[in-house]
Image (cartoon, coloured by chain):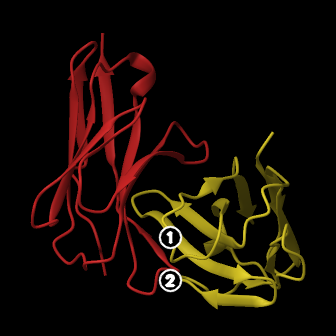
Chain colours: A red, B yellow
Amino acid sequence: DAKTTQPTSMDCAEGRAANLPCNHSTISGNEYVYWYRQIHSQGPQYIIHGLKNNETNEMASLIITEDRKSSTLILPHATLRDTAVYYCIVRSNAGNQFYFGTGTSLTVIP
Amino acid sequence: EAQVTQNPRYLITVTGKKLTVTCSQNMNHEYMSWYRQDPGLGLRQIYYSMNVEVTDKGDVPEGYKVSRKEKRNFPLILESPSPNQTSLYFCASSSSRGYSNQPQHFGDGTRLSIL
């Protein structure tokens, strides 16, 4: 069963903030939300993860709603190199399996 | 350099001819995993390993075998490959057990074509 739901595709103007949403309505209390991205057919690259609080690193910010049923990945100033498929992932209850969603294909437009 | 190394990167073979895709990591990670990626289906987990001699099935284990005799290596074995196993395969590893919040590091992928 799908653990996360993401829009299939999004566009963003270069230099603007890209906001990528993810629904994870069945998330349990001890499950983390992870974001990865994949450029072409390269191996997925880790971006950021969080449990309850909002998180920020050099790549992005992660905003998690208070009920934890959804989150948003924010790329503050999108560049052409940010064009990729972005995956929102929730770790399973057992903590051993990872369920990838179908991902959002982000296209940054010049 | 910390990395996950998969070999081969590309392979074209025929139905029924046993093959092994190797995966090695140099980060002393306990957790390792294999995924396959198909158009429209995203990444699906095949097998994972919590540590040496401990392996478990993921979502799509049929037709695959794995072994974890050493911490650094986690080979994926296709005993009798079939065309429906044509796919892009990724190996990944992460530190500690799956209960930790450590992210996975992915290899560069292996593209298999089974004719």
Q: Position of residue A31 (x, y in %)?
A: 34, 73
Residue found at the far top of this picture: A110
The chain holding disc 1 is: B
Q: Earlier in the sequence, mark 2 or mark 1?
A: 1
Q: Residues within 10 Å of mark 1 (few under 14, many from 20)?
A: many
Residue B16: horizontal and vertical position, in percent?
83, 81
Residue A86 tag number = none
* A49 shown above or below B13: above
Q: Nearer the viewer, residue A24 or B86?
A: A24
Q: CA distance from mark 2 to mark 1?
A: 7 Å
Left-right relation of B26 to B54:
right
Quarter assignment of residue B30: bottom right
Question: Residue under circle 1?
Answer: B44
- Residue wearing tag 2: B59
Q: Residue at x 69, y 70 (%)?
A: B32
- Is A74 above or below relative to B70? above
What is the chain letter for disc 2? B
Callout 2, which amino acid? Asp
Measured as percent of width and height from the top left, residue B49 is found at 69, 81
Front residue of B26/A110: it is B26
Q: Is residue A32 left or right of residue A19?
A: right
Check whether the beta carbons of the residues at disc 2 and disc 1 lie within 8 A of each other: yes
Q: Residue at x 14, y 66 (%)?
A: A69
Is residue A10 or residue B103 the one in the foreground? B103
Please, what secondary structure does the residue beneath circle 2 have?
Answer: loop
Q: Residue at x 51, y 36 (%)?
A: A39
Give left or right: position of B27 versus A21: right
SS for callout 1: strand
- Quarter holding the C terminus of chain A is top left
Q: Amino acid at mark 1?
A: Arg
Q: Residue at x 73, y 55 (%)?
A: B110
